[in-house]
């Protein structure tokens, strides 16, 4: 008698009852379903939706663990001063103190995100009488990674409830949503509680409480510094490794790149979208650099700081890389056609940097750009498909004429 | 219902629920989004529309046999415009600050599709008493949704009702704010009005499955 048999028995006991979907979900989360399709020929593949989702989660785990260490690291760096000459494996970063503090601050975010989100998924499954859908597995992991460490837990819970219900369930659940649910949650938090989602106090643990005391620190993100034309106190190496303040999981570019390679290698994430998003961002960055070089924007203009950032540095500041790899590639809300993916990704990168530079109220435009392009993705696909149909029609005409 | 026959009573009760102008016919959405950030303007707007619709429907109904059908839209517009100007002037005279707050939206009652819709669909074909009831019913249905949306948006967005701080003082940190509650800034923005209206539509249709459209 193992867990598997017990689960199977429970499932049989509740078959046809109202709570059945809840038990089925538990069962198939842990084991292969014991149902066998009868009759006909079938293609057998080991990857179902749950395996795909789990692959993305695996790719996210390094970011989460790094985020925990970084939460502690930023906290102590704010008190004791930033250690000099950090390399990626410095013990100043990877130590128990940092990790424990990070664990205490980040783990509740994960628990609230999964707890609230899955509760709503189970509730809807029971009410609507369908199986519990897997869609929340990845969303629940993404959410703690894209919020500041100190976000109050009840705000996160409200936002998750809103995002899952309005962002997903009203459209018909997993696979039917127009918007990326994780970003819907972030957008809700951003507009509902802006004081907790932006500014220079929220990115470091307990910085809000210390404001106004002798321990007060300036924990603003790099984008925040640029937007105010002030000096950036982090080296490029820090930015790349991720020893900088920011949302929990988006700081380490190195780990995101490793995650991206993993996703591309397992063919879960679309390399077309990732690549074209980065190209879009670079193009926009180049345009701004050109504008500065041509002398159209003078020093002292409020856009000067961000416009004069070398174009390639846009990729390692802010969360464009995280957005490109984990958010834009969401197979449900992204464009489906290959040509569409190029257009979709390019515009995400392009618009992200545009918002980042031009709108001081929104220091980071990545989530807004992705949500906007989520809305346009079906339109892009429609025109790509129509274009193909027209091309073929023309070919047909030439042949028959 | 001694005063009203059952048929007449239906003219009032139908638009309140199963034939609501906002949630079922999806008319008059723009004003429902624009002025519902607080409860007071919502109620003033509801009363203004109630007046314009009740009186307007009666006037059009009385004139219905005199209006040549080719120019009926213009006649209807003149009637609405006259009534709206009356409302506007009354508000300016007796509730200036509210009139400032509602600004252009009182004037825009003229373009409220519910009003022209009821003129066209009902008042032109029915007697004044029936038209009056229909006008009152539809305006009340419109007002009801406005008040519901206004209630939630003001309560959750500003923590107040009619301007009174029912949840405590956010600056002094009393009441709910003492334990870390904060106002939801999103509620004050227009997109949230649309979402609240959407949720009302959702709740209504899941309670009464007949209302779900086939397509």
Image (cartoon, rainbow, N blue to C red):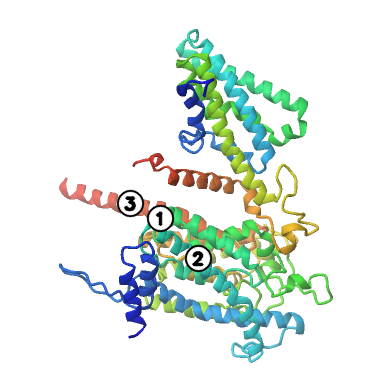
Name the image quarter holding residue A74: bottom right
- Of labels 2 and 3, earlier in sequence is 2
Instruction: Give the CA separation, mark 1 to mark 3.
Output: 29 Å
Q: Residue tagged by mark 1?
A: A172
Instruction: Give the CA separation, mark 1 to mark 2.
Output: 16 Å
Q: For the point 75% across and 61% down, which residue is it?
A: A300
Q: For the point 24% across and 74% down, which residue is it?
A: A44
Q: Nearer the viewer, residue A359 or A102?
A: A102
- The answer to whether marks 1 and 3 sit on the same chain is yes
Q: Chain of mark 3?
A: A
Q: Residue tagged by mark 3?
A: A387
Q: For the point 57% across and 81% down, which residue is it?
A: A66
Q: Chain of mark 2?
A: A
- Circles 1 and 3 in contact, beta carbons < 8 Å: no
Q: Residue tagged by mark 2?
A: A117
Q: Nearer the viewer, residue A291 or A186?
A: A186
Is A89 above or below relative to B140?
below
- Of labels 1 and 2, earlier in sequence is 2
On the rendered image, what quadrant is the C terminus of chain B found in?
top left
Instruction: Give the CA separation, mark 2 to mark 3.
Output: 40 Å
How far across and down, in percent of the image, does residue B87 sit?
Answer: 68, 24
């Amino acid at each position: 008698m193992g867990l598997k048999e017990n689960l199977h028995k429970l499932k049989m006991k509740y078959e046809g009852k109202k709570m059945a979907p809840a038990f089925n979900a538990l069962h198939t989360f842990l084991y292969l379903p014991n149902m066998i399709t009868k009759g006909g020929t079938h293609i057998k593949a080991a990857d179902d939706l749950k395996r795909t989702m789990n692959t993305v989660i695996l790719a996210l785990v390094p970011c989460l663990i790094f985020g925990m260490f970084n939460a502690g690291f930023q906290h102590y760096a704010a008190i004791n001063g930033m250690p000099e000459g950090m390399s990626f494996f410095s013990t100043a970063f990877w130590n128990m103190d940092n990790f424990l503090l990070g664990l205490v601050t980040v783990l509740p975010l994960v628990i609230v995100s999964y707890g609230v989100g899955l509760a709503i998924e189970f509730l809807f499954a029971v009410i609507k009488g369908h199986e519990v859908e897997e869609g929340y597995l990845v969303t629940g992991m993404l959410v703690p990674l894209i919020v500041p460490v100190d976000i109050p837990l009840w705000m996160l819970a409200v936002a998750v409830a809103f995002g899952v219900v309005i962002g997903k369930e009203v459209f018909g659940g997993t696979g039917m949503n127009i918007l990326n649910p994780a970003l819907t949650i972030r957008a809700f938090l951003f507009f509902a509680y802006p004081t907790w989602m932006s500014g220079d106090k929220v990115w470091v643990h307990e910085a809000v409480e210390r404001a106004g005391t002798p321990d007060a620190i300036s924990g603003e993100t790099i984008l925040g510094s640029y937007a105010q034309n002030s000096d950036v106190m982090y080296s490029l190496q820090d930015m790349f490794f991720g020893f900088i303040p920011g949302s929990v999981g988006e700081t380490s570019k190195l780990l995101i790149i490793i995650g991206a390679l993993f996703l591309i290698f397992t063919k879960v994430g679309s390399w077309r979208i990732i690549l074209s998003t980065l190209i879009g961002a670079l193009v926009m960055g180049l345009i701004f650099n050109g504008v500065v070089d041509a002398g159209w924007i003078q020093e002292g203009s409020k856009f000067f700081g961000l416009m004069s950032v070398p174009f390639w540095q846009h990729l390692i500041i802010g969360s464009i890389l995280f957005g490109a790899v984990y958010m834009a590639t969401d197979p449900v809300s992204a464009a489906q056609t290959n040509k569409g993916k190029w257009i979709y990704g390019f515009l995400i990168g392009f618009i992200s940097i545009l918002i980042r530079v031009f709108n001081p109220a929104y220091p980071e435009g990545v989530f807004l750009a992705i949500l906007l392009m989520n809305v346009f993705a079906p339109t892009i696909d429609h025109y790509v498909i129509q274009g193909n149909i027209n091309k073929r029609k023309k070919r047909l005409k030439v042949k028959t004429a | 219902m001694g005063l009203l026959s059952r048929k007449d009573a239906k003219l009032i009760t139908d638009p309140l629920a199963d034939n609501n102008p906002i949630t079922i016919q999806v008319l008059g959405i723009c004003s429902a989004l624009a002025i519902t950030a607080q409860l007071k303007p919502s109620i003033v707007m509801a009363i203004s529309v109630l007046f314009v619709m009740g009186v307007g429907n009666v006037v059009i109904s009385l004139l219905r046999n005199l209006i040549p059908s080719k120019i009926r839209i213009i006649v209807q517009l003149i009637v609405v415009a006259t009534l709206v100007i009356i409302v506007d002037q009354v508000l300016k005279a007796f509730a200036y600050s509210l009139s400032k707050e509602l600004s252009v939206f009182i004037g825009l009652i003229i373009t409220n599709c519910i009003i022209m819709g009821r003129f066209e669909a009902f008042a032109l074909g029915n007697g004044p008493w029936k038209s009056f009831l229909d006008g009152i019913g539809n305006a009340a249905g419109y007002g009801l949704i406005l008040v519901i949306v206004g209630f939630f948006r003001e309560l959750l967005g500003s923590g107040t009702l009619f301007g009174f701080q029912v949840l405590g003082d956010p600056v002094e940190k009393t009441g709910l704010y003492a334990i870390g509650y904060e106002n939801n800034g999103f509620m004050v923005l227009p997109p949230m009005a649309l979402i609240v209206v959407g949720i009302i539509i959702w709740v209504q249709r899941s309670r009464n499955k007949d209302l779900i459209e086939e397509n």
